[in-house]
Each structure stands twice: as C-alpha cells, then as structure tokens.
Image (tube, rainbow, N blue to C red):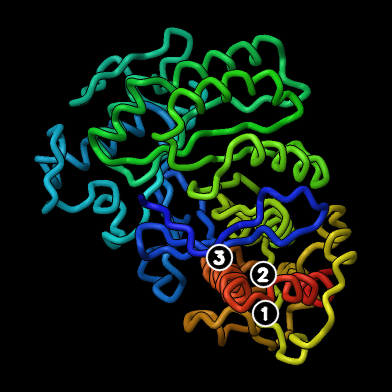
Amino acid sequence: MLFSPLTKSKLQSSKAFLNRARQGLLKGTVSTPSYILPTNLGIIPGIMNMNLPEISPVPVQFSLADIYHLREVIEKYQSDYPSLSSQTKNQNEPNPLLSYLNHPKDTVSLLTMSTCGSDKILGNYKTMEMDIPSTIHPGNKNRLSLQDFSAAIATFKPDLFITPTHSITAKTSKKKRERAVKTSREYINPSVLNLVQDRGPQVLMTISIEESYPKISPIIDEKISQFGEKISGYFFNTHSLKPQTRFAVFQKFYERYPTDEKLRVLESSGNPTEVLENLVLNGIDLFEARYPIDVSEKHHCLAFDTEMPNEWRSTPVDTEFIKESLSNPTKTPRTLNLSRSEFRKDSTVLTSGSKSPLTNSITRSYIHHLLDCKEMNASILLTIHNIHVYDNFFKAMRSHIADNTLEIYTQWFLQTQCK
C-alpha cells in the first residue's frame, strides 16, 4: 500500500473532544500529517523547485484543467520520453508525471481533474491531435470527459488520483444537483478503477460532505460497498460546514466506514486553526491547502512561531479551552501586511519562524519597498518565506504527535500565536 499508518487514530469514540490525530507514511518518504499545495502544473507560481530544498517532502498535485492542458502535457511527454505512450510501464523508466515536473522520483504524485469555461481557453480544439482517445462534451468543448481522464491516468501513471465529482451546497440548483448525482455514478466505475490494478495508481474517493450530503450518500454507500477494497482513501470536501457540524458528520462517516488503514485527505483553506481542528477532532492525514500562497498574494507574511517553548510542556492541558476554540474558531494566526506604511522603515527580519536561508535575513522594509515598486520578487520571497513557516508548522505537529504532546501544543498555539 502507498499509505502506512504508524499510530492508531481514535476515530470510533463519540466523545465531544478526543485527540484523533495520527502519524503515517506515504510512499515511505512523506510523513503525515502533511499538506498539498494545489497548483495546475504541480509548481508553485513563480518559484522553482530548487528554491525550496529545505522543506519536508510533500505530495505534488497536478490538476488537469481542460483538453488543451492535456494536449500540452502529452506532447511534452512524448518528445522527452517516447516510450511513455505505451500501455506497459517499464520499471526502469522515470515516473512520467514527476519527470515532467522535475521532482525527485520518491515524491508522491497526485492527479486531479477540474474544468474550465470556454471563455478562458484560447485555441482551436478541432485541430487538436493527441495520442490518446478524447471524447469532447457537446455542451462544453473544453471539458475533459471520462475517457480523457482515464487515458490521462494510464499515461501519467500517478501514485494517487482523485475521483471527480461536483460539489453541492444548500444553494445548488436542481439541475446541478442532478448533474452531481450523474457525475458521482459515472466517474466511480469499473473502467476507472480497473486502472488501479492494471497500472498502479491508487484511488482517493471524493466525498462531498455538504448540507446536501443526503442526496449523494446513497451513491457513496453503493460505490464503497462495490469498490471498497480498491479505494485507498477518501478526499473530503466540507467547505460549507461549520466545525460543530463537520465533527458530527465525520463521526457518523467513520462509524459507518472504518478508515483505519485508509488515507484521509481534506480540501480546506489550510488556515492553521482549521488544520488543528481537523487534525485533532477529525483525524485528517493530508490537507489540500493554498493558505501560504493565498497569504502571500495578499502581501502578508506569516508571523507566528512554530516551536513551543519547553516550559509549556509542563502546563496542564485545558481541554475545555481547546474544544471551544476548535469548535468555534474566532482567532486567526498572526500575519503582517507588509504593504502598510508602518513597515517602510522597519529593519526587523520577516519572522523567526521561517529558517529559510533565502529569506531569514530579509527585512520587512525591504519587502515593503518591493511591494511599493510592484516588483515581482516581493511575492516570490513572501511565498518562499510563508511556505517555510507553514512547513515548520506541520513538522512541529508531527513531532508533538510522536511525543504525545499535541494537545498542549494546540493550546499554546491558540493562546499565544493567534490574534
């Protein structure tokens, strides 16, 4: 199996508060809990992989947006690795997805599927030539079909792929609800799941847990019953739920479908308080999160510490405070908006939490100057800094899970590093 749990997660208890966090290992190299930075080409905007050698090994995501995107990648593959179009996988060949992205071979690759509106794509789809079958939707000439996605899995050979679905919320129209049900039936089927046995990728089944979850749950029941052994994990979407509701829904899901050996992935904002909530209360292993990138785009730098002082280890755990803070989040981690004039003459380094050799000596006034001049290096340096802080945050959580001190770390973080 690609994922190996190292510690047991206490999911089956119905207690209102219980530390459900666990440690695990992906592909023998990626320690969990960890995060994925969702980007179209598996590359952080404006940043080369060589600029981030100090961060922990993290999974890399490749999101197929449309058939033009698919054609571009296939053409690149075929020019660099002609044999990759064959249906058999030569063990001596590099992993095609990781080779294209210039990532080490032990990186975990994740393939997802998204769609784009026709007004966002330039080009002539009628002249498109691909070495894989393509079925174009009549209503949207750019949208990837089930055949496109299946062929992409066979060609790219990712470690994991996420089954496509439509998100539905309380405000979703009747037409989109019907489409969501149809999608859930179409994309989780034998023709897709047979690729798991034939070519190696493992499946993360998408579970959209929204207010309208009851509309989809019968299909989920049917698919888990039919393909349970082939499903390696679950990709949860809970955007519209409040923490209290999310905890209750997760608890019911875990009681119905034991997930002790399966990977649990959550699509989230990635805000550290939300990460702690879903790690401690809901036992999530992997977070798909744009948080450090989004913060950088708003000209903010992460200003919280990630290393808890030793004197806090002897502090009594306040269970009620942790429960209340995670269930009703009102605080956010400390950040600094470096575009504000107050930082014009601030010679302080960004923060002490980064430890990046590229940014640990850069001052706030320097970034303010770059932002004021609209220099692109400002967002690049901020992103590098923020990813290092974010990575150190996950390293700290893994360390405290191993030391059985995650509760007091959560209490320290919420009391001292949030505002």
Residue 171, x across and y down, in percent: 77, 22
Mark earlier in primary sequence (3, 1) = 1
The residues tagged by marks 2 and 1 sit, at their Cα atoms, a distance apart of: 9 Å
Residue 214, x across and y down, in percent: 71, 22
- Looking at the rendering, which quadrant does residue 22 occupy? bottom right
Image mark for residue 364: 1
Q: Residue at x 63, y 28 (%)?
A: 167
Residue 18, x across and y down, in percent: 75, 59
Q: Out of 45 and 284, give the one closest to the viewer.
A: 284
Q: Residue at x 31, y 35 (%)?
A: 196
Q: Could you say whether the residue bearing mark 1 is in a helix, strand or loop?
A: helix
The amino acid on which the numbered mark 1 sits, given as a three-letter code, is Arg
Q: Neighbour class for label 1 at 10 Å: few (<14), some, many (≥20)? A: many
Contact check, label 3 and label 2, Cβ < 8 Å: no
Name the image quarter holding the C terminus: bottom right
Given this view, does label 3 or label 1 mark the residue nearer the observer? 3
User: Viewed as shown, does residue 99 lie left or right of 30?
Assistant: left
Regarding residue 274, the answer to whether it shows in the image is: yes
The amino acid on which the numbered mark 2 sits, given as a three-letter code, is Cys
Q: Residue at x 41, y 20 (%)?
A: 189
- Looking at the rendering, which quadrant does residue 306 occupy? bottom right
User: Mark 2 highlights which residue?
Assistant: 301
Contact check, label 2 and label 1, Cβ < 8 Å: yes
Q: Out of 7 and 357, give the one closest to the viewer.
A: 7
Regarding residue 381, the answer to whether it shows in the image is: no
User: Viewed as shown, does residue 301 lie left or right of 97?
Assistant: right
User: Mark 3 highlights which residue?
Assistant: 383
Q: Is residue 344 above or below residue 165?
A: below
